[in-house]
Amino acid sequence: MENKEKGFRIAVLSGKGGTGKTLVSVNLAALQADSAYVDCDVEEPNGHLYFPMEKEAKTQVYSPIPQVNDDLCNGCRECVDFCRFYALAYINEKVKVFENICHSCLGCGLVCPTNAITFNNSTVGTVSTGKHQGIHVYSGSLEIGKASGIPIIKELLKKSHKEKRLVMTDCPPGSACIVMESIKDADYCVLVAEPTIFGAHNLALVHELVSLFHIPYGVVLNKCTDSKNPSEKYCEENKIPILAKLDFDPELGKLNSDGKIVVWEKEEYRTIFEEMASRIAKEVGHETVVGIER
């Protein structure tokens, strides 16, 4: 059932951390015998705890940082005025660069009228690759104090782009730039939400985001109880497909907290996630999504 021409990419995201985004992405990946799992939550990567890599390979990721030639600089301050991250300042008749808050947009070099700005590469983090029981694993890690994980996410997506199989992308929480970078090449998005007022609020944020990108999507409601479910109501009001409802289950929470793959541990959950995968496949008409027997 593998697509021989192109891998099918599913991005899993949520409006905040702790909703079950990694639970969903890890277990959907685990249904397939040879899928790929990409952990783009580079500030707090934890997917490797579920998929400890065999023969792990690490590569450094670099980002361009401006360097100013004082002999060429005429003190016009156009670079300082351009930078929206305040990574440049004009002090004692020299441009000072604050490396740790530079987002490497390269804009300062473009606006400099005297070509006084060039760029040197600085390490921002690492990308790890490997396999776990046949699953191809990609994980990024941002160095403490660095401004943006986007260069690492770009490298993760570049490395995983060659995959001609199901690719599950575990996105960072929220709806900021690093999430946009993670979903831009996705064929389908799974939005994970909790059954609370705050959950519905955060669901609305990511719903707006995927709508802007014109990527098809569906919702998984996690930690459901018999109480009112504002997130479910939001889906009904906005005609959003509900792919699955996962009940609040202390045993599921215990297995997940122990780094266990629940579809490998309990037949009950394997059935639930297989039905979830079938629903996604039905939504997108793509058979690669449906699980292969492990």
Image (cartoon, rainbow, N blue to C red):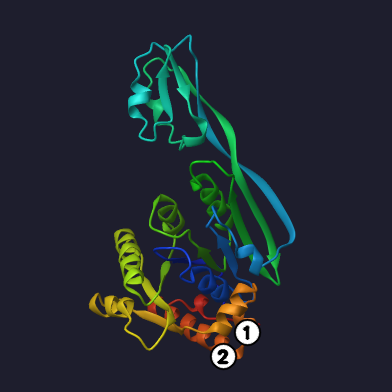
- Please indicate, yes or no, whether residue 5 appears anywhere in the rendered image: no
- Going 69% across and 50% down the picture, which residue do you hit? 58
The residue at the far top in this view is 71
Out of 56 and 47, give the one closest to the viewer. Answer: 47
At mark 1, the secondary structure is: loop
Residue 134 position in % (x across, y down): 69, 71
**Residue type marked 1:** Glu
Alpha carbon distance from label 2 to label 1 = 15 Å
Dot 2: few (<14), some (14–19), or many (≥20) neighbours within 10 Å?
few
Residues packed near mark 1 inside 10 Å, few (<14), some (14 to 19) or many (20 plus):
few
Q: Using residue 50 as the reference point, say whether residue 177 is left or right of it.
A: left
Badge number at residue 268: 2
Across and down, in percent, residue 119 comes to 52, 27
Q: SS for tag 2?
A: helix
If the image is split into quadrants, where does the C terminus sit?
bottom right
Q: Could you tell me residue 210's position as x and y percent?
A: 34, 63
Nearer to the camera, 99 or 282: 99
Determine which of the numbered discs, if any, sits on residue 293 in the image. 1
